[in-house]
Amino acid sequence: MTREELKATAVAMLDKAYCPYSHFPVGAALECADGTVFTGCNIENAGYSATICAERTAVVKAVSEGHRDFVRIVVAGRSDDYCVPCGECRQVLNEFAPNIEVICLNKAGEEMALPLKALLPYGFDHTYL
Ligand code: THU
């Protein structure tokens, strides 16, 4: 899948978001080293803390299907600002793909691309245990 196709895949997931509380849809498209793509959207809950973000939805789908080798993720939002992953999602991505490229989109489809290491310096991992 090309970069533009991956971005379009994440944007398409905005329509799947379940966000009746925040009204802040997020879509994600996670690309594996073998080219497999897993999608995600945020899924909110009346018990707010049970909400899962779009990025973690995609990671959970991928890992549960036997994929752990991630190379890039697109995070799409509908706000003026680029939609960056929350701290918890950064930490979850760091578990499997500390070198992943994170491509953040705004509502215009413009991108800000960063390595995860720039978003999460000194990420906690197994080497600390
Ligand atoms: N959200 C995500 O899906 N990904 C992020 O990294 C940031 C936040 C969702 C969670 C919640 O449903 C809504 O955006 C507002 O926080």
Image (cartoon, helix red, strand yellow):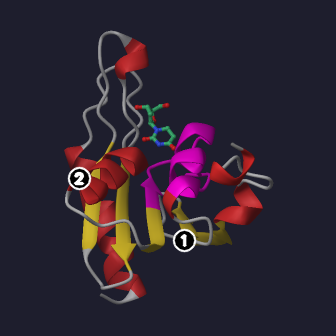
Vertical side of 87 occupied by 76: above or below = below
Which stretch appears magenta?
Answer: 75-95
Q: Which mark is residue 110?
A: 1
Picture residue at 34% right of the left edge, 63% below the top: 10
Q: Does the magenta portion include 81?
A: yes
Quadrant in which the N terminus is drawn: bottom left
Give the residue pinned by disc 2: 64
Vertical side of 29 occupied by 35: above or below = below
For marks 2 and 1, give the CA distance. Answer: 31 Å
For the view shown, which residue lies furthest in the bottom direction? Answer: 2
User: In terms of image quadrants, where is residue 23?
Assistant: top left
Quadrant in which the C terminus is drawn: top right
The kind of residue on which mark 1 rests is: Glu
From the viewer's perspective, is 112 left or right of 58? right
Q: Position of residue 34 (x, y in %)?
A: 31, 85
In this rendered view, identify the residue nearer to me: 23 or 116. Answer: 116
